[in-house]
Image (cartoon, coloured by chain):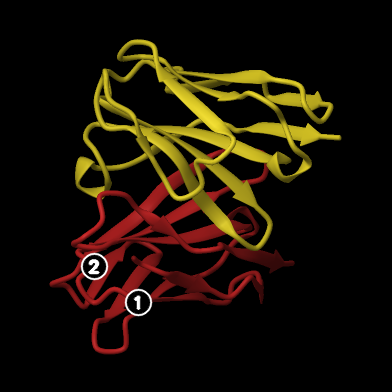
Chain colours: A red, B yellow
Amino acid sequence: GEDVEQSLFLSVREGDSSVINCTYTDSSSTYLYWYKQEPGAGLQLLTYIFSNMDMKQDQRLTVLLNKKDKHLSLRIADTQTGDSAIYFCAGLSGSARQLTFGSGTQLTVLP
Amino acid sequence: NAGVTQTPKFQVLKTGQSMTLQCAQDMNHNSMYWYRQDPGMGLRLIYYSASEGTTDKGEVPNGYNVSRLNKREFSLRLESAAPSQTSVYFCASSVGPGGFGGELFFGEGSRLTVL
């Protein structure tokens, strides 16, 4: 089945850009998602990308997909303290019926 | 809008005790899920219910049972709790099954400690 991997921690300065990376194993993955978890809360969908796209932009968020390398990234421009959270990458492979989540990346934004 | 509501939010159990985590959604979603979240391991699917009347095992079902009571409610039961079940449990729902069913909506989580 699908395996999704992320680095566990990332620290950036307020105002800088953050780039959170994710790799997945199933080349038949059709949808790839980014979810955000704020402290003490459940996950909320941030954005998603379909496998036939290379890039998707939504305000401060840019998602890049490299299908050849099975690499997904989330770039947050002008990172703010309110962006401090855990970010989860998730994939849906063609053979699976459920999402597979990565371990999550804890983003800390320093003032 | 309440969305997905889980109870209790916190629970401490002794090894061998049983308990049920309750989940209800008010979005008329067909599919519901139970995940556990452990440090460094992300979310792992325990059980899911693609539609009312059906339940299926996820990645880590051992030690758990579920009941899809009706379209709104999906409960998770630990029959004999073990310390390895110490975790944060999340209920989620979606319009349809799996990622094709659209966005997953999550509850706020239930933090369970088994001593």
Q: Which residue is mark 1?
A: A25
Q: Residues within 10 Å of mark 2 (few under 14, many from 20)?
A: some
Dot 1 and dot 2 within a common chain: yes
What amino acid is found at the position of numbered circle 2 in the picture?
A: Ser
Q: Label 1: chain?
A: A
Identity of the residue furthest to the top in this view: B70
Toward the viewer: B69 or A57? Answer: B69
Q: Which residue is mark 2?
A: A29
The reply, left or right, for residue B53 in relation to residue B14 is: left
User: Which quarter of the rendering shows the N terminus of chain A?
Assistant: bottom left
Disc number placed over residue A109 in the picture, else none: none
For residue B7, say whether it is visible: no
Q: Say if B19 sits above or below A76 in the image.
A: above
Q: Say if B67 sits above or below A30 in the image.
A: above
User: Could you tell me which residue is drawn at 49 percent across and 73 percent down?
Assistant: A5
User: Could you tell me which residue is drawn at 59 percent across and 61 percent down?
Assistant: A80
- Residue B62 percent coordinates (x, y): 55, 41
Q: Label 2: chain?
A: A
